[in-house]
Image (tube, rainbow, N blue to C red):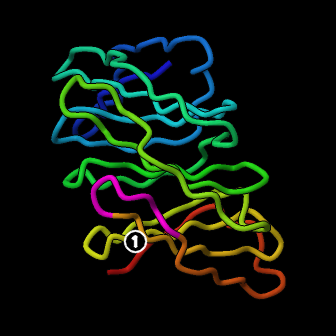
Amino acid sequence: RVIKVSLGTGDAPPVRIGAVTLDPFEEQLFSSVIDPAAGYAYFGTRTAPGSVVKIALGAGTNPPTRVGAARLEFGEDLLRTAVIDTAAGYAWFGTFSDRGHVVKVALGTGAELPSRVDGLRLEFGENRLTCAVIDRAAGQAWFGTRTTAAKVIKVDLGSGDAPPTRLGTLTLEPGEDFLSCASLSA
């Protein structure tokens, strides 16, 4: 389920607004990105293969609704991390699989369904992607791994429908393992 909660103003407690139950094989949500201006959120599943589910947020006190989903390809599993560029109309999902993938998904305008555009299969050892940051202006993202020692993989996101491409990898020092979050200082 995707549950909408009003956060409450001032000292008021949060309030549950409503929820939407997703289709079978969409029950394990693992990542998400949001386009608040357009009123949609996109959830990556923990399934094999993964799916990207588009949810209409619902205006005001209206509950969220399921718009549809893009089913990804074999090996594009366990969508653990994601970044979004709403102006360009794309999101990129990183997998937690044994060999990492970065999958480019077109968001779809309005109630149009999301769709898989292309994917990048990373090199051996560049797996279990757990965090990501995006520099929209540069058209690049960095994906961190849950490995020993952890890695940071730099990816060119590809303009338009061009596929993402791998630019390089930094392997961190011994003991700098299992990345779980990241932030970008611009």
The residue depicted at 40 percent of the width and 14 percent of the height is 19
Residue 88, above or below 148: above
Q: Position of residue 102 (x, y in %)?
A: 55, 55
**The C terminus: image quadrant:** bottom left
- Relative to 177, 90 lies left or right: left
The residue depicted at 27 percent of the width and 32 percent of the height is 40
- Relative to 6, 180 lies left or right: right
Secondary structure of the residue carrying tag 1 is strand
Q: Position of residue 44 (x, y in %)?
A: 52, 37
- Relative to 100, 140 lies left or right: left
| Residue 167 vs residue 154, the one in the foreground | 167
Main SS category, magenta section: loop
Q: Is residue 116 magenta?
A: no
| Crowding at mark 1 (Cα within 10 Å: few <14, some 14-19, many 20+) | some
Locate residue 76: give its quadrant: top right
Residue tagged 1: 140
The residue depicted at 49 percent of the width and 70 percent of the height is 155
Residue 25, above or below 93: above
| Residue 129 vs residue 72, the one in the foreground | 72
